[in-house]
Image: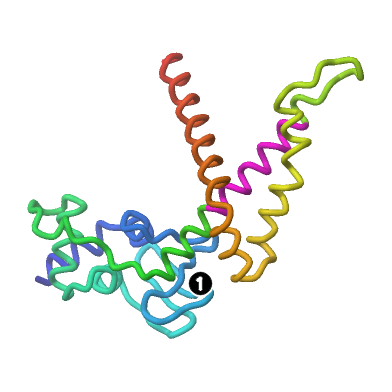
Amino acid sequence: MESLFNEVKERLNLIETAQYYGVQPNRGGFVNCIFHKDKTPSLKLYPAHFHCYGCGKHGDIITLTTQLFGLPPYNAAQKLAQDFHIIRGNGYQNIKPKISEQMKHYQQEQKTFRLLNDYCLYLEKCREDFKPEAPEDELHPLFVESLMKYEQYNYYRDIFITGTEDERREFMKTCTKEIANLEERFNQNNNTKRSKTHERE
């Protein structure tokens, strides 16, 4: 048992493992604590351990996995070993993480903010790249889009920077269509870029 614990801890990165299981840290490496009700991210992920600066909980990759999946420590170590091909087996691979509703909402907020921020940066770039060189030049569609959409989406982005939790929840409830369309557009752009890269190769 001890050898399995040691091998899992030595070979796996806690941050990468948490992300694999759906726990996405913010830019500072923090997530909402899964050990207590956490309104703001206070659980810091490190490569070899985690620490919550709210409730004081501290532990390693196995401790984190026991909480995520509701497993005893040895079973958690087995799941890690199987999921990351340290040992053979599939007895624990179908167990889904017990991510709280609060954490799911927080992760969705982070995803939405990244989409809005990426779109605003994209519009800024389009405004610069496609601005007309002379008054009589025909306006590029992306330049027009940057003029028409930037203020609106910059306002949306500000909701996630300076807005309240209620304002963010209301936005995500009422603007799901806009966000879905934005995500689809960025996915299509990324797929197009990957196709062009493969063609060049």
Is the stretch drawn in magenta largely helix, strand or loop?
Answer: helix
Seen in the image, is 1 located left or right of residue 193?
Answer: left
Which of these two is toward me, 48 or 126? 126
Q: Residue at x 67, y 66 (%)?
A: 163
- Span highlighted in magenta in the image: 112-127
Which of these two is toward me, 100 or 61? 100
Q: Is residue 24 above or below residue 36?
A: above
Q: Quadrant of the N terminus?
A: bottom left
Q: Residue at x 43, y 21 (%)?
A: 195
Task: Give amino acid for label 1.
Answer: Pro
> In this figure, which residue is indicated by the disc labeled 1?
41
Which of these two is toward me, 35 or 123? 123
Seen in the image, is 122 located left or right of residue 81?
Answer: right
Q: Position of residue 41 (x, y in %)?
A: 51, 72
Q: Is residue 161 above or below residue 128?
A: below
Which of these two is toward me, 51 or 2? 51
The image quarter in which residue 155 lies: bottom right
Q: Residue at x 30, y 71 (%)?
A: 64
